[in-house]
Amino acid sequence: MSSTYEAYAEALARRKPAEEGLGERRLSFAALGFEPTFVTALQKAFPNVQEPTAVQEKLIPEILSGKDILLKDGTGTGKSFGLVLALLNTPRVVVHEGGKSRRVVTTLFIVPHRDLAYQLVEWIERLASAFGTSGGLSSIVQVVVRGSNKTLGTTIEEIKETPPHILIGTPQGLLEIYREDEDALQLWTLSTVVVDEVDYLVETAARKEAGKSFHKAYEKAVRKVQLHPGPTREILDVIYGKEEERKERAQLIMTSATLRVHLKDYLFEESGWLDADNLVKIVGGKTEAKEVTHSILIATGVREEKTEKISANVVETIATAFAVDVSGTALLVVPASAGVQRVVEDLRSLGVDAEGLDVRRGAAGENPRLLVATAATMRGLDLPQLSHVFVVGLVDGRSVNGRVVDSYVHIAGRVGRFGGRGRVVSVVEDEEEAKKMSRILRTIRVPNKHFP
Ligand SMILES: Nc1ncnc2c1ncn2[C@@H]1O[C@H](COP(=O)(O)OP(=O)(O)OP(=O)(O)O)[C@@H](O)[C@H]1O
């Protein structure tokens, strides 16, 4: 696979810029700058993908023209897929040293969790094999995540020996490698850096008008972020803080379905990462998942002491709702404090075919299946088999604020993708929590429908 693909990627380096051939933009991948061989492979690998989506039509040419991009569009509009397509169509970076040429990593693609990394690899794998080549994938894509079955040493060796076109990693995984061996990630020669789900990966403090007490809370939040900037910031500070070490600045692309104002302010005014003179902001149109219904269910049963974990009442209510309404596959999103494995076991003891979400696991059997995850481990995943999403309470907090509303948007966005149908059911402990959930639904302007 690598040889044909590499020849393609290197031929791209010699090609005239995509815009010159664009003329009037039409809704076809070829018109966006992809070669016919690539379009053929794309449609062979993904027969459902015939035309670019609205956001892909805007995004792909900007990526190919090398601009910095800040992209916000609804969930399931094809952002991540569009990124993958465009990035496979950027020329490989080749470094010339001492009379010799060698390929280096071209794109660093930062994602919030392991499963999203594996999903992107699976897409690339399908595309690469439709390209009609055989052999290892490692020169096209490699993954860096913590807790994989490879040692740190092996991962570093593989990247150095066969630098991939696209290196996909979680921030923690990438930082671990950088700390072990500064040269392994080849940060100084990167052509593009992508931060997918940036609002999750880069934490900022919400700035608000308001009185003294809020000001104190804000200062505290700022100090917290300064003290613990998080691995994504650390990596971006390394890449964009040492401009003098690079010949050319790496293009930076950041995307999410939700971008809060304070994050945008931080990115534009403080981060120093973006190139203001070569930046485009892409904001998608209003995407309403009309075929998705939202419901709030109050758990019934004997009220128990509230703990950090999910109560037996909530688990039983989910098991019942699942039995009544799900005939295929559903997702259950629980607070991280509940422990996915524990919830899986509780559900199994009630006869539910539950398992922890893992995109590498095979397709479902005959029985209805409930995949259990946290808000952090399902971010950005494309799970077309889902009909329902169950959510335990507010998941990401105790009171309704912007972050909690955004989290709900991402959770609910696992269904209703590409105009599909779906049902989102929030299971809450009591009336008080039900009121908070209703506020979230009102904020995103969807009605609370009776379940089922
Ligand atoms: N142009 C297209 N035509 C048809 N289907 C598409 C197209 N582009 C992507 N898809 C399908 O959409 C799914 C991918 O959506 P993707 O994950 O990229 O959406 P997203 O906007 O990144 O979502 P989220 O905000 O939840 O991360 C895949 O199943 C892919 O096959």
Image: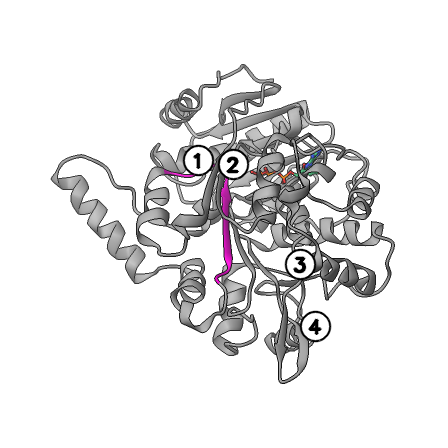
Can you identify the residue that label 1 sits on? Answer: 406
Question: Which mark is first along the chain, 4 or 2?
Answer: 4
Q: What stretch is highlighted in magenta?
A: 249-260
**Which amino acid, by three-letter code, is at mark 3?**
Pro
Question: Which mark is first along the chain, 3 or 4?
Answer: 3
The residue carrying pointer 1 sits among few (fewer than 14), some (14 to 19) or many (20 or more) residues within 10 Å by Cα, namely: many
> How far apart are labels 3 and 2 at the CA level?
33 Å
Residue at 62 percent of width and 54 percent of height:
117
**Residue 191 in sight here:** yes
**Which amino acid, by three-letter code, is at mark 4?**
Thr
Callout 2 touching callout 4 (CB < 8 Å): no
How far across and down, in percent of the image, does residue 195 sit? Answer: 51, 52
Can you identify the residue that label 3 sits on? Answer: 91
Q: Nearer the viewer, mark 4 or mark 1?
A: 4
How far across and down, in percent of the image, does residue 12 sit? Answer: 71, 56
Colour option used: one colour
**Which amino acid, by three-letter code, is at mark 2?**
His
Can you identify the residue that label 2 sits on? Answer: 410
Q: Is residue 352 above or below residue 86?
A: above
**Which amino acid, by three-letter code, is at mark 1?**
Asp
User: Looking at mark 1, is its residue's CB closer than 8 Å to ligand 1?
Assistant: no
Q: Mark 1: which secondary structure? A: helix
> How far apart are labels 3 and 1 at the CA level?
35 Å
Q: Is residue 66 above or below residue 311?
A: below
Q: Residue furthest bottom?
A: 98
> How far apart are labels 1 and 2 at the CA level?
6 Å
> How far apart are labels 4 and 3 at the CA level?
16 Å
Callout 1 touching callout 2 (CB < 8 Å): yes
Q: Mark 4: which secondary structure? A: loop
